[in-house]
Image (spheres, rainbow, N blue to C red):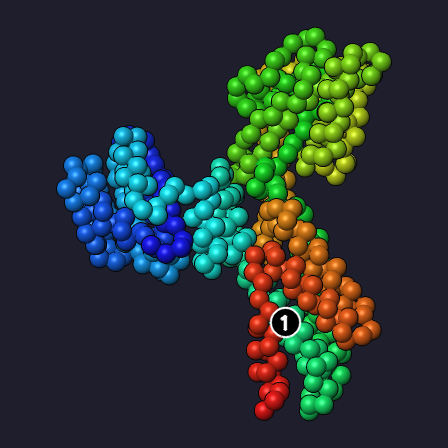
């Protein structure tokens, strides 16, 4: 054993009748194979072995053993995998046998991925993409997480980082080697490259919050006055009774959320308390209305429900952005002219009969698809990603405004560090490589 432990964990399982994969990673992975499989196995080839507690131990199970020497493994270390029957008894016994070996311990949460990152097998954003892939519930979430895990952020940062490192190398050369035969006015020559990167960052940051919508879900708030059928509409969309429906005003006091999969995208419908005059409501109902207004103001789309059967009743304004608002007239089956679109409404539906619900959902699907459609730049899935790019963009703005080469160089360094934080990489040695390669200083 070396000074680094071997870790072992159950990486996947499918219940009693399924297959479980027990994975060991680290310097003692080969010892794990020898102990339970009775000897070495060929690298990168599956071997069917009886698995025991040592050569003289009783057989625990019969399964496939794979030996993956580092660095060509998922973690970059020596890795052993045991594919066994997925019963709790088999899994528990094998884990206890492996963890009893010298230097072997259970893995901490996420430790396999962390070792893969530390060993250069994936960048930090890729590790986050793997976490998202594990939690993906919809096709759009899977696709987005897969792209991120495969290094789409790293590719962009590598392209822009290369431009900035070259520009910084030129500036460093002009600052540190003024007596060398270098091109004149290097600070002016690097400006177009810096401006191009700054423009690319600005476009990336200006894009809608696509990553959050895909990863966490497109949020839709259902708001309106009491008894207009908000809860009935939610139940119709969910195709089950998730909200209590009653004629008593104020029945819904809190926010009730339902997750749905529309066109492969996660959509969260939020039923809210009815909005009416605060003076006519008690303290609890007023709190519910405050939450309803918050939901309407922060949702990606608000459905303002009105009663088509009582058009003279004024509808409470939800306070949503008009660009993210649809007026939906419900109870059209009770209206004087059933099915007709009331003035000012975008859609006419009946939560009781289902009339018009398909058209409404089709419009929602179109809006979700348009808001989350793939663009030139990958979607930012976490606040950390946006903060890193905002820091980089601010540093480039300062760099272009600076009048001294030293100040420009310092801001370029800060921009590079911000982009390196995005993918979890910092490397200062490549600047020296660029300086000597481009200008042959000291030749």
**What residue sits 67% from the left and 16% below the top?**
252
Q: Residue 288: x percent and y percent?
A: 73, 19
Of 412 and 314, nearer the camera is 412
Against 155, is 26 above or below? above
Assign the C terminus to one quadrant of the image: bottom right
**Height in image: 344 above or below 196?**
above
Callout 1 environment at 10 Å: few (<14), some (14 to 19), or many (20+)? many
Q: How many marks?
A: 1
Which residue in the structure is indicated by mark 1? Answer: 165
Q: Position of residue 389 (x, y in %)?
A: 67, 56
Residue 258 visible in the snapshot = yes
Residue drawn 17% across the image and 42% down it:
50
Residue at 56 percent across and 18 percent down: it is: 242
Q: Is residue 212 left or right of residue 411?
A: left
Image-based side of 136 in relation to 417, left or right = left
The quarter of the image holding the N terminus is: bottom left
Question: Where's residue 44, x and y in %?
Answer: 27, 57
- Residue 347 shows in the view: no
């Amino acid at each position: 054993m070396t000074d680094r432990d071997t870790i072992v964990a159950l990486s996947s399982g499918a219940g009693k009748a399924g297959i479980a994969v027990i994975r060991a990673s680290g310097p003692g992975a080969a010892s794990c194979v020898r102990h339970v499989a009775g000897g070495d196995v060929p690298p990168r080839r599956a071997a069917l072995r009886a698995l025991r507690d040592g050569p003289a131990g009783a057989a625990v199970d019969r399964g496939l053993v794979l030996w993956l020497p580092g660095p060509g493994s998922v973690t970059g270390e020596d890795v052993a995998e045991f594919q066994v029957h997925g019963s709790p008894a088999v899994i528990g016994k094998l884990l206890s046998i492996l963890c009893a070996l010298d230097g072997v311990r259970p893995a901490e949460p996420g430790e396999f991925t962390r070792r893969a990152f530390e060993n250069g097998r994936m960048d930090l954003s890729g590790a986050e993409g793997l976490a998202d892939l594990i939690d993906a519930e919809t096709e759009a979430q899977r696709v987005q997480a897969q792209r991120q895990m495969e290094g789409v952020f790293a590719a962009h940062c590598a392209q822009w980082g290369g431009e900035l490192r070259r520009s910084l190398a030129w500036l460093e050369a002009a600052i540190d080697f003024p007596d060398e035969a270098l091109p004149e006015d290097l600070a002016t020559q690097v400006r177009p490259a810096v401006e191009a990167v700054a423009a690319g960052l600005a476009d990336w940051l200006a894009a809608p919050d696509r990553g959050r919508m895909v990863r966490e879900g497109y949020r839709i708030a259902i708001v309106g006055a009491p008894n207009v059928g908000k809860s009935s509409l939610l139940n119709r969309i969910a195709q089950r009774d998730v909200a209590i429906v009653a004629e008593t005003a104020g029945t819904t006091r809190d926010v009730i959320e339902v997750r749905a999969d529309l066109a492969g995208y996660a959509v969260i419908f939020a039923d809210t308390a009815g909005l009416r005059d605060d003076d006519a409501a008690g303290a609890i109902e007023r709190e519910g209305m405050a939450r309803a207004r918050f939901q309407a103001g922060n949702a990606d789309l608000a459905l303002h429900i009105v009663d088509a059967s009582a058009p003279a009743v004024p509808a409470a304004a939800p306070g949503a952005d008009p660009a993210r608002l649809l007026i939906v007239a419900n109870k059209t089956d009770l209206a004087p002219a059933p099915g007709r679109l009331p003035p000012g409404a975008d859609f006419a539906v009946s939560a009781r009969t289902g009339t018009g619900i398909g058209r409404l959902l089709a419009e929602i699907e179109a809006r979700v698809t348009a808001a989350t459609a793939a663009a030139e730049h990958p979607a930012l899935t976490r606040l950390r990603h946006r903060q890193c790019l905002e820091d980089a963009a601010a540093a480039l703005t300062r760099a272009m405004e600076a009048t001294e080469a030293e100040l420009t160089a310092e801001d370029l360094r800060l921009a590079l560090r911000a982009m390196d934080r995005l993918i979890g990489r910092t490397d200062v040695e490549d600047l020296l490589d660029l300086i000597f390669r481009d200008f042959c200083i000291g030749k």
